[in-house]
Amino acid sequence: MKDLASASTDKIKSFLKGTAEDIQFAAQLLTKGKVVALPTETVYGLAADALNPDAVREIFTIKGRPLMDPLIVHVLDLEHASRIAEINETAKQLAKSFWPGPLTLILPKKPCVPDLVTANQPSVAVRSPKHPLFRAVLKASNLCLAAPSANPFSYVSPTRAEHVRHTLGDKLPYIMDGGPCEHGLESTILSLLDPKAPIVLRPGPITAEAIEAVIQRPALSSSAEIDMHNPVSMAAPGLLKQHYSPKTPLYLCHRDDLDGKDPLAAYVFWQRPQPLDFNSKFIYWLTEDGSVETAARSFYHLLQTIDNEGHNAIFLENPPHGDGLYLALKNRLQKAAYKFR
Ligand code: TXA
Ligand code: MG
């Protein structure tokens, strides 16, 4: 068994790999109030015992996240969800269809949930992740795990263990490597505080259409956007205009504006240009096959990679029009580019 006592001082030497021993070790760390980065099917998460305020505080410290931004609590199943949230019929229906998977439900919270998790709100965000390693740790620990994306606050989200090590490795001794994330974009967040009028707070891999097909009523999209400097608007958090941004200035462009004229810039096409006759050697594309699923999966990885190459700008072609996953990807792109307008 690995040495738990050295957990807080260790720098990362190697990733936890998801062997039976590593899973037990991660569960033990979490039970003792430590923070462990774990893979999910959306992005990597920074996990800690949701019912332990000291452990949760450590998540905020490691991420540099403002305390008014609440966390998602990850649970094994609906029964575990009912430990922390009031489950209504609509939630049951949706959980039956989409859990485990990338759908987060906002529900009234139970008193056991620390105010730190919910930023003093009466609601809690709950989801049951699908990644087998995250599930194995939930099972081994028997905990509910608060976990935001494992990136420094407002930076690009991590879709590989290496991204977490690169950006947070000096603050976080334990990262479990579960390979590249399947979806590559964060979960859909749906408010069920009024189950008759569900609201999509964050578009994601589970589309509004798929939700509507299950609950047989409209799921409205929230158009509210949050101003970090206006505490009143933080009553509906999670909708910051600026988020997921690289350090390198990022500009969304029409394809015709990708001209290759700046020798130090990176140019990102939607799909591989045919033929590949382009001025710049710094040319990338989001999807080889043109599918939006592939583009979503590679988006954060590409941004992290390009951001580490030292370009003076990133010019990225706007994705084609579309709904469903296109809306989720556009949402992330616009937030990532917002501060460079
Ligand atoms: O796919 C995901 O959801 C990933 C993985 C790790 O599960 N997690 C994730 O967490 O994206 P995070 O913290 O980066 O984003 C969660 C969002 C935040 O913007 C937060 O404001 C919102 O969920 N949120 C959390 N609790 C809420 C609540 N009670 N009401 C409204 N929004 C809430
Ligand atoms: Mg995040």
Image (cartoon, rainbow, N blue to C red):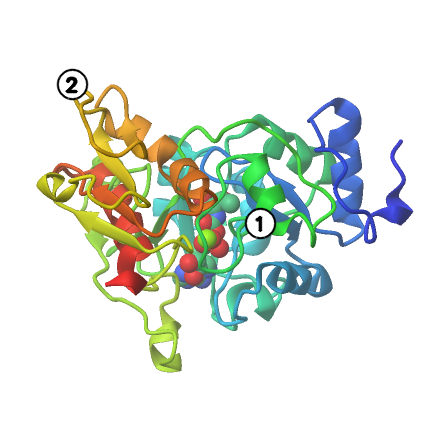
Asked if the residues shown at circle 2 and circle 1 are in contact, with their CB atoms under 8 angstroms apart, the answer is no
Residue 239, how many percent across, how many down?
Answer: 33, 62
**SS label for mark 2:** loop
User: How would you rate the neighbour count of disc 1 (Cα within 10 Å): few for under 14, some for 14-19, many for 20 or more?
Assistant: some
**Rendered location of residue 229, percent (x, y):** 38, 79
Q: Residue at x 18, y 43 (%)?
A: 318
Regarding ligand 1, which quadrant of the image does it lie in? Answer: bottom left
Label 1's element?
Answer: helix
Residue 275: mark: 2
Which part of the image, by quadrant, shows the C terminus? bottom left
Q: Which quarter of the rendering shows the N terminus?
A: top right
Q: Where residue 297 sits: x, y (%)? A: 37, 31
State which quadrant residue 134 falls in: top right
Nearer the observer, 301 or 263: 263
- Judged from this view, the residue extending furthest toward the left is 256
Q: Which residue is mark 1?
A: 167
Q: How many marks?
A: 2
Label 2 CA crowd tier, 10 Å (few <14, some 14–19, many 20+): few
Is residue 86 visible in the rendered image? The answer is no
Rendering quarter of residue 205 = top left
Front in this rendered view, residue 222 or 107 = 222
